[in-house]
Image (cartoon, rainbow, N blue to C red):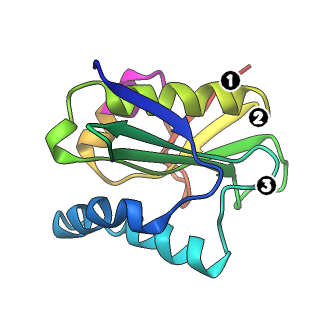
Amino acid sequence: MKNVKITRSESLVLSEIDKLVEESDHEGFRHLKRLVNEYQAGINRFDKQGEALFVAYAHNRIVGICGLTQDPYSQEGTIGRVRRLYVSKDFRGSGIGSLLMDEIMKEAKMHYRTLVLKTDNPIADKFYCSLGFELKTNDLYITHYLQLV
């Protein structure tokens, strides 16, 4: 999509994502509220080694967001986790999710061997599978994984 800029956020200004959080909440998604709550509490700032937060800008506003963290459910240190991917409904289908995930995967390849995530959304399932993720069954914390090496 033209006029979309993906940037790595070094310090998230929470007021800049208020509309995105409100929209996601209205759709019944809770993960952006969790992002804000954890960020405010200092629980997850995407600032540890191998972590990053990317935002998508279009028309001078944030229209998408996605993070990468160390997988908190693994002791290995070789597994990264995709966190809090959300694209504004007005911009879905325009490639913004793929652009965000391209950045996540590039960053993850520098730090991890495997990238994992958990979703119960069938549309997200198809999206992640289209990016090469495979389904993981019988795991409480992982629904999809991607081998990076």
Q: Which mark is residue 75?
A: none
From this viewpoint, which residue is outermost toward the front?
60
Mark toward the start of the polypeptide (2 vs 3) = 3
Task: Count residues near mark 1 (Cα–Cα under 10 Å), then give few for <14, some for 14-19, many for 20+.
Answer: some
Q: Residue at x 53, y 36 (%)?
A: 7
Left or right: residue 11 versus residue 14 is right
The image shows residue 79, relative to residue 128, as above or below, that is below
Left or right: residue 74 versus residue 123 is right
The image shows residue 9, relative to residue 107, as above or below, that is below
What residue is pinned by disc 2? Answer: 112
Secondary structure, mark 1, is loop
Q: Which of marks 3 and 1 is in front?
A: 3
Mark toward the start of the polypeptide (3 vs 1) = 3
Q: Residue at x 31, y 41 (%)?
A: 60
Magenta segment: 127-134
Mark toward the start of the polypeptide (1 vs 2) = 2
Q: Which mark is residue 148?
A: 1
Kindly tell me whether residue 134 is visible in this rendering. Answer: no
Which amino acid does the dot numbered 3 rest on?
Lys
Q: Nearer the viewer, residue 89 or 134?
A: 89
Which amino acid does the dot numbered 2 rest on?
Tyr
Q: Which mark is residue 48?
A: 3
Dividing the picture into quarters, in which one does residue 64 lie? top left
Which amino acid does the dot numbered 1 rest on?
Leu
Badges 1 and 2: C-beta atoms under 8 Å apart? yes
Q: Position of residue 8 (x, y in %)?
A: 59, 40
